Image (spheres, rainbow, N blue to C red):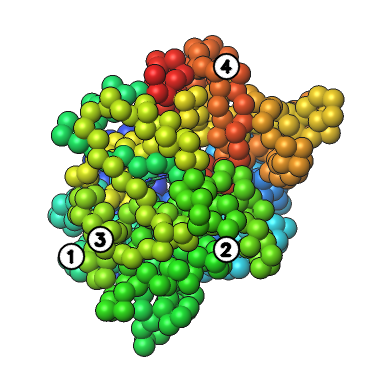
Amino acid sequence: MTDAFPPPDAFRFFCETAERIRATAKRLEKALFLGDYFRTLADEDLVRAARYFSGYVFSARDQRTIHIGGAALIAAVTAASGAEEALVRTRLVALGDIGDVAGELHGVTEAVPGPSSHLCLSEVESFLAALAVTTGTKQKILAVTKVLRGLSAPEAKYLVKLLQGDLRIGLKEGAVEDALARHYQVSVGEVQRANMLTGDIGETALLARQGTLSTAALRLFHPLKFMLATPATDLADLARQMPSDGFVVEDKFDGIRAQAHLAPVAADSPPLHGTEINGKRVALFSRTLDEITGAFPDLLPALAALIPETSHQGFILDGEILPVRPAAGKALPTDILPFQSLQPRLGRKTLTSELLARTPVAFVLYDALFSDGRILLEEPLNVRRAALVALVVDGQVIRRADSRVFVGTADLDQEFEAARARGNEGLMVKDPGSRYKPGRRGREWLKIKRTAATLDVVVTAAQVGEGRRSRFLSDYTFAVRTSETDPTLLNVGKAYSGLTDAEVQELSDWLMAHTVQEFAHGKVRTVEPSIVFEVTFDRVQPSARHKSGFALRFPRILRVRQDKPASEIDTLESVRRLAEADGAALD
Ligand code: AMP
């Protein structure tokens, strides 16, 4: 193969298209460039390219992950480029993206000549698959370094961007859906609907090409994305958003969000996920779409028992896993324990029966997405609720969230206090006519949390503490996202209180290993933005010190949110609203 005529599946074309898309701010142009490129690809490459342009290395519902952090990517880029590490770090600060640094520094030294060999998209896929099964950071760095050395500069740049999980060219999955709709002349709604069901933009792209979007089917035991909620700033805000003739109010449970897939065991080949129990198949998925069935063996028999004997199809249910007081039963419904009580069970490889008995859980159901063969995603909440009500729950291990209809906001203050007294975090307010929108944070679900406002933020830098904590990175600078669509992080504060010594020590080790840049002999470090904190504070005030323009006054860390990825933290918009509301969520 010569350089002059690379085939359409060359990764080089992908990179060229990405550059064209990056160079324009116009959504329409981005879509046209993408459509032109898609046209040239064979089916299997269309699937790959659609995933890669959406920032996924694998199908979104694939359980494989690459798990390569920023620090490892920096190490690989340094080794592959032959540049000094200090130069790599300086350029990283200037460009803000390790992929861009990889492209810029590629082959800067004599030792690494700019090669002309080319990867094709299927080779990119094989490489990613191999990397997913490579264990150990060292081995991963070696594998990435080796591949980068054989690439041209644009290929190195985009491979690193892919590994980082975001190409940063102003394109998100939604824009890829748009481009598919435009190119294959179908409505965006059709593409979105199919994509919601397949859970894989690659497969969706292929259906769009084949004109078979309407055949997209929901698959049991493949997780669907979760619908999310927006914080309500005050009651007036809530009244504006919700229908005047009534809205649904539920407690906001503070546990682990989970999606249960249940089905009678089919005779044909068993699906990838789930466990067989009492002749039924059951799987649980977390909000990051990882399978967590193994972490809750004590929920499985009760979940299996939810399937009526007359049912031939399955169910998909949405809810929250909560820690409850041991020997629950009599004390209901106030046996719910604080989230922290779940900690001893999390991250354990083996769960002894003693531990399970000491930390019992309950699954509170609040939505039904699929009910014995019926897809309910596009049905209004009250229809989905009716499907949930039709299930026979035992009321202890499996519970149904109490759902109350309110007209007007007059009694909400009292209801909020009652929810708190029941051991819950606050209230969820839902529009009864709203559909279930997987992966979207809409205004159809509003959340009201503690009276003191909280924000979910990501740690961007850390510094050693004082006194007892001088050996640990224990002062944390944290940031919010610019917006839902712009992942640029903006710092809003710094906190050092709220965690236990053991938590500080564990975090410190992690932050050391995931440092991006060191200052003051390692006493101050910028770190990979991955640790999510829920913080509370006295108020939000304008500040010239942070780029965000705001600072939290007296912030305190409430907890480390292991269940929440950095892509789902709060945005500058939430900070601004809180600043306007003067830091109170309910007054
Ligand atoms: P947050 O985690 O603060 O972004 O709030 C949204 C989360 O509240 C959801 O992801 C759920 O895990 C949780 N949640 C608790 N109770 C409910 C409920 N009744 N309905 C929906 N989500 C709930």
Q: Amino acid at mark 4?
A: Arg
Q: Is residue 557 above or below residue 257?
A: above
Choose the circle earlier in sequence order: 2 or 4: 2
Q: Quadrant of residue 484?
A: top left
Q: Residues within 10 Å of mark 1 (few under 14, many from 20)?
A: few
Name the residue tied to disc 1.
214
Q: Is residue 51 above or below residue 18?
A: below
Q: In front of the other: label 3 or label 1?
A: 3
Image location (x, y in percent) of residue 123: 49, 67
Q: Amino acid at mark 1?
A: Ser
In this rendering, the count of numbered labels is 4
Name the residue tied to disc 3.
387
Image location (x, y in percent) of residue 79: 70, 50
- Tell me which image quadrant ligand 1 sits in: top left
Choose the circle earlier in sequence order: 2 or 3: 2
Q: Quadrant of residue 263?
A: bottom left
As rendered, which of 246 and 170 lies closer to the eye? Answer: 246
Q: Is residue 315 above or below residue 386?
A: below
Choose the circle earlier in sequence order: 4 or 3: 3
- Residue 128 in view in this figure: no
Name the residue tied to disc 2.
295
Q: How far apart are labels 3 and 1 at the CA level?
A: 24 Å
Choose the circle earlier in sequence order: 3 or 1: 1
- For image coordinates 31% across by 64% down, the residue present is 391
